[in-house]
Amino acid sequence: MQEPIVKLQNVTKKIGKRTIIDRLTLDLPLGEVFGFLGPNGSGKTTTIRMMVGLMSLTEGEITIGGHSITKQYEKAIRHVGAIVENPEMYKYLSGYDNLIHYARMIPGITEHRVHEVVKLVGLEGRIRDKVKTYSLGMRQRLGVAQAILHKPQLLILDEPTNGLDPGGIRELRDYLRQLSKEEGIAVFVSSHLLSEMELMCDRVAIIQNGKLIDVRTIRGENAAKANNRVVIEVDRTQGALDVLLAAGVSGVLEGESSIAVDADKESTAAINATLVAAGIKVYGIRAQVKTLEDQFLEVTGGERIG
Amino acid sequence: MGNFLPLIQNENMKIYRRPRTWVMSGILLVLVIAISIMWLIFGGRDASMWDVAFLESSILFLLVTIFTVVIAAGGVAEEFTSGTIKLLLIRPWSRSKILLSKYISIMLFAILLAILLFASTILINWICFGINADPAIKPGFMGIDQASPVSYMLKYYGLTLISLVVTVTLAFMLSTVFRSSGLAIGMALFLLLGVNSFIGLIAMLKYEWIDYLLFIHLNLTQYLDGNPMRDGMTLGFSLGVLAVYYVIFVALTWYVFSKRDVAS
């Protein structure tokens, strides 16, 4: 496997006595859409701010393309395109002038490239209008445009689907997947919208209270197999649990007349046989495939901000 | 890395694409014309064009300072309040260079306004008073021993520009440190106008430390006619004190801007 484009090592951020980010370690390879999932206030934006050098690190190290973001900022940030929080633009300038403004800051961006990007995000019709007349969705598109102007190797997007309509979200999703697969760039997307991450990302990191809780693969063979939960409706729940326990399977009570166990296809059949053999009536069996949302709520404990 | 000029081009674009910049320049021009016409109406035509030009320059240069303070105060603070600072900083440029480009474009604006004032006072008053003027009318605004009115005016502009640079740098610092353009404008103008009105009183006090106050030295034109505010002060001494303040302002501005966590 190739060297990851981004490496976060023991990244810690303290403000006063509060630890905002606690020893975060992550690697991002090229060609992957990586989701960064967490409830509000969990430290997603703070992490992104540190990745693009807007905030200092209390401890740890972030390297992008092998360059340290703190020590070799100009080299590290050269191949990064980003939107941090909302894409705020100069409202008194036209969309085009905004793009020219950013294009001037990186050598080698031609006017042709600017037009190409404008077309890509579908803003041709309004690009000469002042940004203050834009809707939120159009600003989001302009934000994406400024982030990809210089063909970055790493694209960081903070809540990119904010303000986009369903069509726009789909378009963006397809575009990001295409970017990562065809141009081989790494895309780092933060969101608290779980369903969307499921559709967009290859892998998802879940963060809560500044701590990395889990990294899960969404696409790929492992994803489908694991985490199947089977709910079995029986006549005597306690009896069924006892029988299963004796057979080495631990289950839990699920509602009044059901129990739930973790099992794949084969062991579901075995469990059923065991129960029937023990004289327990089985009224129904259904597989409960966990969505990312369930997983997310599970690992974060459904906890509120506090 | 790369060419620095596009950064200044960017900052210039952000200054000159805004209507307020043109409104300010327009106000300056209109006032020059208005004062000359009022003079024509109430004072008649038998005045030296240089007297009117100098009077207008000495009144309106304050406006040049105020307008530049407004632009300087907005320079950094507005990037923070609008949130655009985030997208501005994540480019392959160090923060100090981005700040320098802002500072340079603000100073360019000050110089342009000063040139506009100088050129318009001379042109308009030449039209109003200079064409076919009575050769007997001599300019009376300067001391008798001075050489030419042009060189006197240029010296006057030079000295006031030095104070302008210090005042504007102060506003730029306040803008960067407090990230609020209102506060920066308010404080800079209070120091400029408010303190100026009782500086004469302070200057009369006999304490040693007053010699080192910034505001005693902001009016450098006191040396043009050779009567300094406090005994024994020289132009060199004033420039020295201003230079020390300037270095402190600049150092503080750049330090704060480079170190700050951007979290707006």
Image: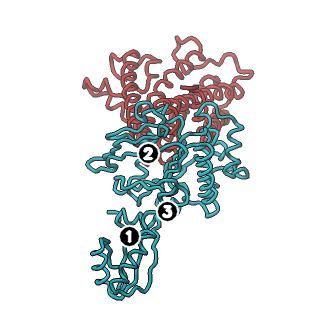
Chain colours: A cyan, B red
Res B56 visible: no
Residue A262: numbered disc: 1
Residue A211 screen position, x and y as percent: 34, 53
Q: For the residue labelled by badge 3, is the local secondary structure a helix, a strand or a loop?
A: helix
Which of marks 3 and 2 precedes in the sequence?
2
Q: For the residue labelled by badge 1, is the local secondary structure a helix, a strand or a loop?
A: strand
Q: Looking at the image, which is closer to me, B23 or A207?
A: A207
Q: Label 1 is placed on what type of residue?
A: Asp
- Chain letter behind tag 2: A
- Chain letter behind tag 3: A
In the rendered image, the vertical position of residue A194 relative to residue B81, given as above or below:
below
Q: Label 2 is placed on what type of residue?
A: Arg
Q: For the residue labelled by badge 2, is the local secondary structure a helix, a strand or a loop?
A: helix
Q: Residue at x 60, y 19 (%)?
A: B139
Q: CA distance from mark 1 to mark 2?
A: 39 Å
- Would you identify the image quadrant in which residue A269 lies? bottom left
Residue behind mark 3: A224
Q: Label 3 is placed on what type of residue?
A: Ala
Circle 1 packing at 10 Å, graded few (<14), some (14-19), many (20+), is: some
Residue behind mark 2: A49
Q: Residue at x 68, y 41 (%)?
A: A114
Res A89 visible: yes
Is label 1 or label 2 in front?
Answer: 1
Which of marks 2 and 1 precedes in the sequence?
2
Mark 1 and mark 2 in contact? Answer it, CB < 8 Å.
Answer: no
Q: Looking at the image, which is closer to me, B180 or B89?
A: B89
Q: CA distance from mark 3 to mark 1?
A: 14 Å
